[in-house]
Image (cartoon, rainbow, N blue to C red):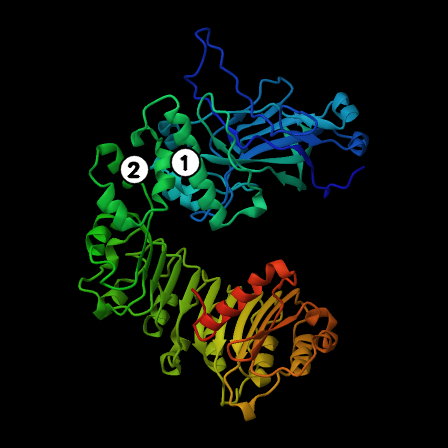
Amino acid sequence: MTQPSQQLRIIAQPKALYRERYDSEQYKTGNRIQRYIRAEDNQLKLEYPTIEISEEWRDGILPQYIRVTSVTVPNDMESIVCVHPYPIDSDDSSVQKDPANNALYFPITKGDFTNGRKSLLVTRKKLVQSELKSHGPLRIAGSEQRHILGIIKTSRSKQLIETYKLWKSQLVFSRAEHIGDEVFNIFTESSVSSQYFLFSFPNEDTAAPVVAPNDHNEKSDFYCATYDIVEIMSNLTRRNKSKLELLPDEIFLELFSYIKPIDLYHGFLNLNSRLNNILNDTYICIHIINDDEHKSDQLCINYFAQQIIYLAIDCHWTCLSYPINLRFLTNLRSLHLPMPTDEQCLDITPTNLPYLTNLTINDNVFKTTLFNINSFPYFSTCCIPRIYSSMLNTMKSNQLCLTLHSLQLSSCLIHDLYDILPYLPNLNYLEIVLQSNNRNIQRDYIKHNKISHLKIKLRKLDPDFEILLKSMSNLRRIEFLWNNSYQWYNERKNFNFNRFSDIINENSKSLQRLDIDIHVSKCDYDINTIHHINLRWFSSLSIIEIYNDRSFFITTKKISSNPEDKLITTILQSTYMAQRNARFNR
């Protein structure tokens, strides 16, 4: 019998463009106009999505099935995969249905075993907004839990459409065994996701771009969204005069996500009631650099206050000609405010910002924010530009912060870090610029067993780096950044790879990945010599010379040696030169 962990193989992917049907689209006789999800062009000329069937499954004692479920596509606004609310269906009477998980179970027949494949005839119905509103919060895929964002936004169907990008979908195929009475044993290890597909309009022959699940990134999302809009508009104009109002609400929501809020405010507000309603359902992200560039931001912020989910203010409050009141931003998720006013500091409370998840704040405020008796229920990520020891004198009186999972400290001493860690028991990611420490730590090592990912930038291996690793026994990944390129010629020194190797080997037994970026003013080592110091961790290191100052960059990043790809090295050099003195990017 085949091992349950064997992943299924998709022979024919679902077509990247699909036209759903509403319930109202029926013949007069009452029969639904069926429109099955078709397959992409393939060598076998299969018409419908098809899964390879293994002959070994025939030996199974229980009846074998292929489970198909429809899920949402992760995006910039929401990375959690949920069960898609648009129901899938099949006319095959032998197919068993699970509406709660939007899943279908297709039996594997003798003919399927003989052919070595199973074609799946699946339809999908699009919900109107009233149906979507009554659907309730979305269920997290593979779980009985409801997604919290869906619970918050249940009352506004347009926001659900925008948040989860419901015009996109994926099918997940899994192998299952029928135990009986509509009970199935699902082999989750066999699950495989299809490419995502988009809705289309009738008589549309043009396919959308094919994007595999692992290719997801902001750049591909932008190009795909632009391509989708152009394709849909071109199909509309083939039948109608070109009018912006012909676009459906979903496309407006996608389009507005790429337009600056100030341009939305001046360009689309009060054109008509429909666009106003769509604007009121659009999530807003605002980044303020200076008053000169954003003179009209105050009006924009006041109008979109309830819709702002991200706010970054990268200038001192004295540089702005208007105050920004945080208490009205009740749906704010991310706040980057390294230089707040006193009033803004007082406004950062769970009552005013109940959904706050990510926060960048100065050291004067972080203690009361993180360790407040009335904690933020969704607060998970915090960035603090600099920690001063004087601010930590009363740490022992503070509450634990149980929700925080990620902490970034842009400048900190190790003993200050040790004052904070005991109050963050669930922290699993730590990013820190560790300053040189002249004080001895007169205490036992503080143990933190939850931190699995450490990103550290420092200039001194002993003793701080070793002390830090001894404190974190369950590290799975380390990103090590070292910058010691600014030295007088007669003071230039090599990086001590032997000592670095000893510290890693002795204190990181659970380590699975080590990323290294070392920038030094001198490197007398041959790269092969460095590799042989520690074959496990150093064998992937490459070295390049920074031509601007004759320093050296030693890294585990992949650098192409192909002459046609020399531009990669040039970009890497210039980028590092530009950012080597900068703080960690937020």
Work out whether residue 181 can be spotted.
Answer: no
Q: Quadrant of the C terminus?
A: bottom left
Give 489 or 57, whichever is nearer the viewer: 489
Q: Any mark on residue 278, and which?
A: 2
x and y, in percent, of residue 65 in the image: 69, 29
Q: CA distance from mark 1 to mark 2?
A: 17 Å
Residue drawn at 21 percent across, 33 percent down: 272
Examine the rendered structure and indicate whether residue 531 appears above or below residue 63. below
Q: Which mark is residue 229?
A: 1
Mark 1 Cα-neighbour bin, 10 Å: few <14, some 14–19, many ≥20 = some
Name the residue nearer the viewer: 553 or 120. Answer: 553
x then y, percent, for residue 270: 20, 38
Mark with earlier residue (1, 2):
1
- Give how far across and how far down residue 128 sits, in percent: 38, 26
Mark 1 element type: helix
Examine the rendering and report whether any part of residue 62 can be seen.
yes
Residue 570 x/y as whole percent: 54, 66
Tell me which corner region of the image, top left, top right, bottom left or bottom right, holds residue 388: bottom left
Q: Residue at x 51, y 80 (%)?
A: 549
Quarter holding the N terminus is top right
Secondary structure category for the residue under label 2: helix
Within-10-Å neighbours for mark 2: few <14, some 14–19, many 20+:
some
